[in-house]
Image (tube, rainbow, N blue to C red):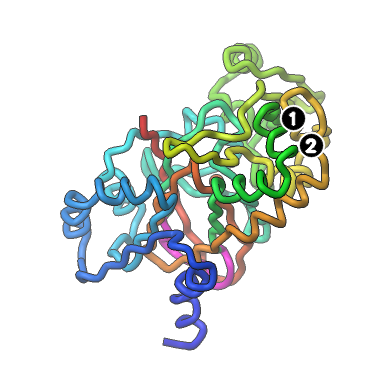
Amino acid sequence: MTLVSFVKAHLIHFIQSMTETNFPIIESNDSGIKDMPGVLNWLSHNTDTYKDQLASAGAILFRGFPVNTANDFDAFSAAFNYQDFTYEESLSNAVRINFTPRVFTANEAPPEVEIFLHHEMAQTPISPEKIFICCLSAAESGGETPICRSDLLYAAFKEKFPDWADQFKSLGLKYRLRMPEQEDLSSGQGRSWHSTLNVASREEAEEKLRELGYSWQWQEDNSLITTTPVLQAVKQLPDGSESFYNQVLAVHLGWQKVGGGVGNALTFGNDEAIPEEALRELAKLAQEYTIPLDWQDGDVALVDNHRVMHGRYPFSGSRKRQVVVCLARDV
Ligand SMILES: [Fe+2]
């Protein structure tokens, strides 16, 4: 093992010891399970325990198990018996490619594009409770998935800036987004309005948006600018803690640059602007609660989407990074 690979293999443990956290929980293949039937047998006895651990820890990383293909990952995630949350039914803005009906690419955005911390689909009224992420092939350099405990972030933000924290909670948020007519693979959010809304015509798009409580404006290039109804910015979790459940950081750090002139992509629910200083402080504070998942081939992470944000660091090198996801409902 080279020094670099040794450091990479122990990076999460090192950061955990520095920050005195147990986030994420790491479950290694200590008993040396060699094949998928063995993995599924082991899971059949342990998923209830992991679900319990997930409820408080927010993320579990399964490392060293023989999960080599999208089909292996499909079977691994299915063993938890959550309900499916398919890409077709989602209002996700990212372009994705399906491998199996439940497994798809995490994001088709180019390697140099950073995906900033977010809760999956928190900018829409329909979002998954759980996310499985699997690394089939790690990038040569970079490509980590940063994860951040939103409950700890919101508690710290509330203590430091109670007025801003209260504004987010009491006013909620509205998101504005441009959906192109055709898929735009150069963007982290280039999914067309046909695909996002799962419709064939403008009339069907309007019908769907009306049902969801959105407002909208058609543009000359046939793209569509949509504004969500007021969505919550803070979510109460079952244990009583509060999570900063939104896309504020992703919009502040990423969308404004790719938004294509939609004006203010995010406001409070009463249309007031969010103070720039509050956004800067949030971004700074989030770094303290962020751990990069430094992928190894075969890793599977299970993330509680209500408690934990995730993103993607840029990557490079000739090795193809292949990270796939499966979204799930727990209702
Ligand atoms: Fe995501």
The amino acid marked with disc number 2 is Ile
Q: Position of residue 327 (x, y in %)?
A: 42, 40
Q: Quadrant of residue 42?
A: bottom left
Numbered mark located on residue 268 in the image? 1
- SS at mark 1 in the image: strand
Q: How many marks?
A: 2
Magenta stretch: residue 140 in it? yes
Magenta stretch: residue 193 in it? no
Residue at left 18%, top 49%? Answer: 44
Above or below residue 267? Residue 94 is below
Locate residue 113 relative to residue 92 in the image: left or right: right
Q: Which residues are magenta?
A: 134-143
Above or below residue 39? Residue 274 is above
Residue at left 17%, top 59%? Answer: 38
Numbered mark located on residue 79 in the image? none
Q: Quadrant of residue 230?
A: top right
Residue picked out by circle 2: 274
* Cα–Cα span, label 1 and label 2: 6 Å
Above or below residue 50? Residue 123 is above
Q: Is residue 325 visible?
A: yes
Q: Position of residue 275 (x, y in %)?
A: 82, 40
